[in-house]
Amino acid sequence: MTKINSTKRQYKILSGSAIPKEYIEKSHELDEILYESEDTSPVEKCLNWYAEEVIACINIMPLTEKYYTKIRNGEYKDTYLPTEAILKYDKIGYYDLYVSSVAINPKNNDVLLLRELIDFVAGRLIEFSERGILCRRIMAEAVSKKGMRLCEIMGMEEVKNLNNISNTYEAKLMPPKFKTPTEKVKELYRIYKIISEVFIKPE
């Protein structure tokens, strides 16, 4: 996310191939401001996955069931994820999502910005559903009190694991079991509820 006009609080969200290389580097700088070193991947690895001021970023990736389960059970730290653990949205079916980080520059930490990030994610999931790409569940590791609060706002429940590496939260999307803090999220909930009850039953 980049800031366009600081007085009117207008923002622009970029995704996919629209993100320039230098923005990835700036997003990594945000992670370094907000997270401990052991909770961030090297910027070179981010670039291999491959202005205006970058003021926020959210990293969400579809993982293979194997690696999703490893992280959920506290057996694996996401900074060591190999590229084969991350899927592409190129096939009709079900996906498990992992939120690796949500970073907002403290100088621009306002509610409007956070709502726009949430709505952007909800909008993408709605677009994906129209292509038969559906998400069964979403998981996040909260490394700060603000992160824990965000998970709770979205209705995510804490996952208890044996290793207790960090505070891990999860929400089921199919059938939907999450809170709806914005109108866009309410729309996502409605669509996923219809799909779950009428059209498709996930395995």
Image: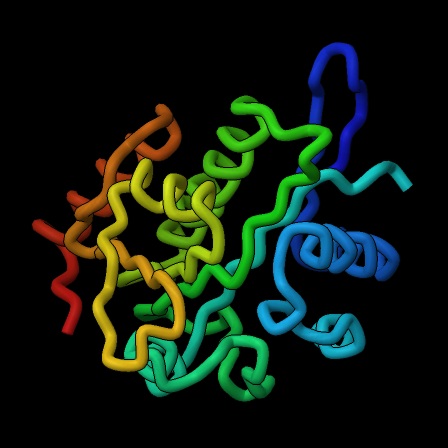
Residue 113 percent location from the top left of the image:
59, 29
Where's the N terminus, which quadrant? top right
Counting from the top left corner in percent of width and height, residue 114 is at 53, 32
Q: Residue at x 87, y 37 (%)?
A: 52
Q: Residue furthest left?
A: 197
Judged from this view, the residue extending furthest toward the right is 51
Q: Residue drawn at (35%, 68%), measured in percent from left and top?
A: 96
Residue at figure coordinates x 40%, y 41% from the top left: 150
The answer to whether residue 154 is above or below residue 92 is above
Q: How is the image coloured?
A: rainbow
Image quarter for residue 181? top left
Q: Quadrant of the C terminus?
A: bottom left
Give the residue drawn at x 77%, y 71%: 43
Question: Eyeballing the image, is 41 above or below 152?
Answer: below
132 relative to 196 in the view: left or right? right
In the displayed structure image, the side of residue 55 where residue 90 appears, left or right: left
| Viewer-nearest residue: 152 or 84 | 152
